[in-house]
Amino acid sequence: MNKKGLLGGVGIVIVAGALIGPKFVGPQVEGALKQHVEVINQLPAYNARMVSFDSGWFGSTATIALGVDFGSIYPEGSAPDDLSFEVVIDVQHGPVLTQFSPGLGMASFEAHAKDDGLREYIEWEEGTPFYHLTGSAGFFGGVSYDDEIVAFSSKPNDEQTSLTFTGYEGEGSISSDEFSYEGKLEGAEGLIEGQAISIGEFEISTEAKGNMLEIVKGELYEGEMSMKLDKIIVGQPDDVDLFELKDLGIEFVNYFSDDKERMNIDMNYSVESLKAENFDLDDLKLKMAFNNIDSEFLLAYNQMMQKIYDQNPDEIEVATQKLVKENLPKLLQAEPEFVISEFSGKMEPGEFKGDLSAKLVGVSQMPDNMEDMQFWLSNLIVDSSIAIDKPLLKWVAEQQMLSTMRMQMPGADEAELQKMAEQQAPMMIDMYIQQGLLKEEDDEYRSEFQMENGEGVLNGQKIPVAKMM
C-alpha cells in the first residue's frame, strides 16, 4: 500500500506541474494539462488521460485518470494489482486569489485523488482526501505547493498483518529551470507475518537545476537529495527486537564538470547504530563518488531505460552491454574514477577505517582484444588502504573460523567450536602477516595497496599483479 501511494503521488505532482505556465488562465490550462498527460504517458509504468475539462471565467476543473502498471516493473508473477484512480484539479484564475492559496498571482489550485476504492482496504477520517495538494502559480510562472497523505490504518483482516500510518506532509516549488521539495513522514507501524515493524520519522529533501518535464523524460541535471530515517525496529510481538537501525542518513549529489561533458555523482551513507543477533555496529560511514562519467553515455542510458524498462532482466542486460560497448571509447577517454573516501565504523572489539580510489587514465584507443588484461592494468591507477584494531580483526577471524567449522562439523558442541576458533584465529592473522597481506602497527593491523603502469605495491613490496589475475 505504501509503494502504491508513493508511485501514485509522483503522477499527481507531475499533473500539478502543469500550473507552471506564465499565461496560466482560461484556455491555457487545458493545453498545459494535455502536455503533462503526454509526459506521464512517456514515463515507465505510467499511463494517463484527460477524462474531462470545464473552464469558466473565474476557474477551471479537470479530471485526469492516472494508472500505474506494476506488471511492467515487477518480476513476472510477483506484481501487485495495478493502481488506477482519478485526480480532480480545481483552479481559480488570478490575479486576485481567494481560494486554495489566497493572495495575488496567476492562479491557485487544489488537487486530490478520487479514493473511494482505497476505503475497501484502509481506514481514515471521513470527508478527508487520502492525498491532497494545494498551491499557487505566480505572475512569472513559478509554482509553490503543499501536499499531504492523511493518517490511515489498514482494515482488520487477520492477526498476522496490520499497518498504521501517521501521516505525511511536504512542500515544494517549481520554476522553468529548477525545483525543490521537502517532505516528512511522521512514522508507521505494522505487523507482517507475525513480525512487528516500527518506522520512525522520515525526512526527504531534494533540489534540482533543470526543467522538471525534461528531467522526468531522462534529461541530465545537477541536483542533490537527502533522506533521513530516525529508526527501524523489527521484532516479535513479545517485544523481542530482532533488528534495530537508528539514524540512517543518505545523500546523493550530482554535478557536471565545467565543460558539461562529464558528470560526477557523490553518494554518502551513515548509520548511528545497527543491531541484530550477535552483531552491534556503531557510527557507520560510507562516502563514495563516481567521477568523470561521460554525459552523452548517461543521457543515452536514461533514454534507453525509458524504452526497455518493461523487458525481462536478460534483455535489459543485453541492451545495456550493447550500449556500453558502443560508447566505451568515450567512456574511457573521460578517465572515469571510483572513490571511497571514507569507510569506517565501530564495534565492541574495536574500530575500522578504509579508503579507495581507482581511475582509468591515458586511454587513447581501444585494444583489438577487449579481454587483454595487460591493457586494463597498464591504464589503471589504484590507491587503497584499510586499518582495523587488533581485537576487532581477531573477532572477525574467529567468526570466519566458526562459520567454516560449523559447516565442516555439523552438530558439534558450540563451546568446543568457539574454543577452537579462539585458538586458531591468531594463527590465521600471523599467516596473513607472513604472506605480506597485513602489517602490524602498534594497536592495529593495516594493509595498503597501490598500482600504476601495471605494477602493484602491497605494503611496500612489489607484486606481479598481471600474473595473479
Image (cartoon, grey):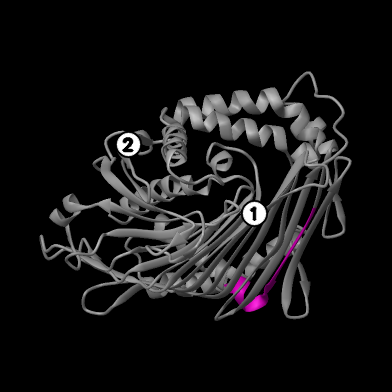
Residue 331 in picture, x, y percent from top left: 74, 33
- Is residue 335 at all visible to an observer of this figure? yes
For the point 25% across and 60% down, the residue is 129
Label 1, on which residue? Answer: 223
Residue at the location (53% across, 44% down)?
A: 23
Instruction: Judge left or right: residue 352 versus residue 452.
Output: left
Q: Is residue 442 above or below residue 28?
A: below
Q: Secondary structure at mark 1?
A: strand
**Classed neighbour count for the residue bearing mark 1: other residues with Cα under 10 Å, few (<14), some (14–19), many (≥20):** some
Residue type at mark 2 is: Asp
Q: Which stretch appears magenta?
A: 383-394
> In the rendering, at what x and y percent does residue 92 appear?
39, 54
Figure disc tally = 2
Residue 69 has which mark? 2
Looking at the image, residue 360 lies above or below residue 350: above
Q: Is residue 38 left or right of residue 455?
A: left
- Image quadrant where residue 443 sits: bottom right
Give the residue at x 80% y 24%: 366
- Secondary structure at badge 2 equals loop
CA–CA distance in space, label 2 to label 1: 28 Å
Tell me if residue 83 comes above or below residue 153 in the rendering: above
Along the line of sight, the residue nearer the viewer: 390 or 119:
119
Where residue 73 appears, as percent x and y from the top left, is 38, 37
Label 2 crowd (10 A; few <14 / some 14-19 / many >=20)? some
